[in-house]
Amino acid sequence: MHFITFSLIACCSLALGWANEWGYPDLDNNQDEPFPKWGGLCDSGKKQSPINLHVKGSLKGEFDPLKFANYDEHQKNLKMVNNGHSIQLSGFDHELTLSGGALLHDYVVEQIHMHWWSEHTINDIRYPLEVHIVHRNTIYPNMTMAANFKDGIVVIGVLYHVSNTRNEAIGSIIKSLGAVKAYDSMNKPTLVADSLAVDDLVPSVESYFTYAGSLTTPTCAEAVTWIVLTETFPVTLDQVNEFKEIEYEEGKQLHNNYRELQSENNRAVVLVEMPEDRSGAAGLTASVSLILTLVLVGGQKFLL
């Protein structure tokens, strides 16, 4: 079995000190290769992520709007790192705070990273890219501490569908990929050439799924409130393929870095729609199922 192995820098990884070797199967070259077992809570937990999100089977809820502070501020000193399992952004000039909705505390953005293919699926459809905006509850001093509590972390998941139009925000990130793609650049942060407002990575938040889940990398701590937006953003296949050139070993590229779907285990999945959005499930189904082409990879539906 093929595994990705690498050493982790604690400040640059959601693995939060996980010491074991872990990785992803290379499904681009072998669609039948099984997902590896990561051990610990990753295998024994009952609130693991990601999951398939169904419009039809979810509970319907209304909350006050989510509040985003400083998300529209351009970050001019962002740092990017290839940590061997993703591309991660950190080093924000301004404190970005999330509150409102069903959240009982304020949450501050710690880092942003990408998964190519998406980790979550919506109505059984897997999208080509998913961006995770990772927030820490401000009552906890760091991510390691926050990961010990069920209200410790909030992750906003943004899914991207394929378009012929390039995504400008993703393009700003890609411009700096050349400095971190190679294996000998792994775990060596570089400044992002273009300034970027986190708002540019977030489409409409009028409708989203929320549920109690986990980190999708070891230690798989069950400390995450997930907010997965139902509106998707466009991205080109060429842009997605740029991420697939990231090396995790000498001469070996990270062709995909998504975790397999986990059991829902009778968890409540709530579909939140703002009061002004009364379009109903039929309209929402159309918006989240913008299908240009469907292919089957490893028995799963993928959106192209």
Image: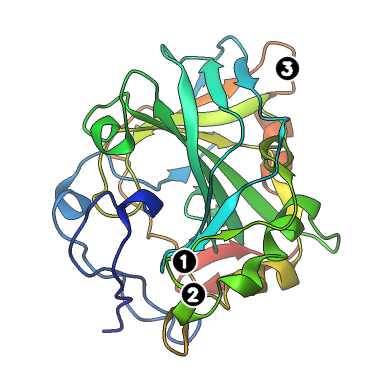
Q: Which residue is mark 1?
A: 188
User: Residue 68, percent across and down?
Assistant: 63, 22
Q: Earlier in the sequence, mark 3 or mark 2?
A: 2
Q: Quick one: quadrant of the C terminus?
A: bottom right
Say few, some or many: other residues with alpha carbon within 10 Å of mark 1 (under 14 / 14 to 19 / 20 or more): some
Residue type at the position of mark 2: Ser
Q: What percent of the width, then of the height, locates residue 230? A: 63, 37
Residue 170 placement: quadrant: bottom right
- Determine which of the numbered discs, if any, sits on residue 185 in the image: 2
Identified at 70% across, 44% down, the residue is 76
Q: Which residue is mark 3?
A: 278
Q: Let me know if residue 218 appears in the view.
A: yes
Q: Identify residue type, mark 3.
A: Arg
Q: Is residue 123 visible?
A: no
Find out whether the residues at labels 1 and 2 contact each other: C-beta distance under 8 Å.
yes
In-front residue for pair 65/294:
65
x and y, in percent, of residue 224 in the image: 35, 34
Q: Secondary structure at mark 1?
A: loop
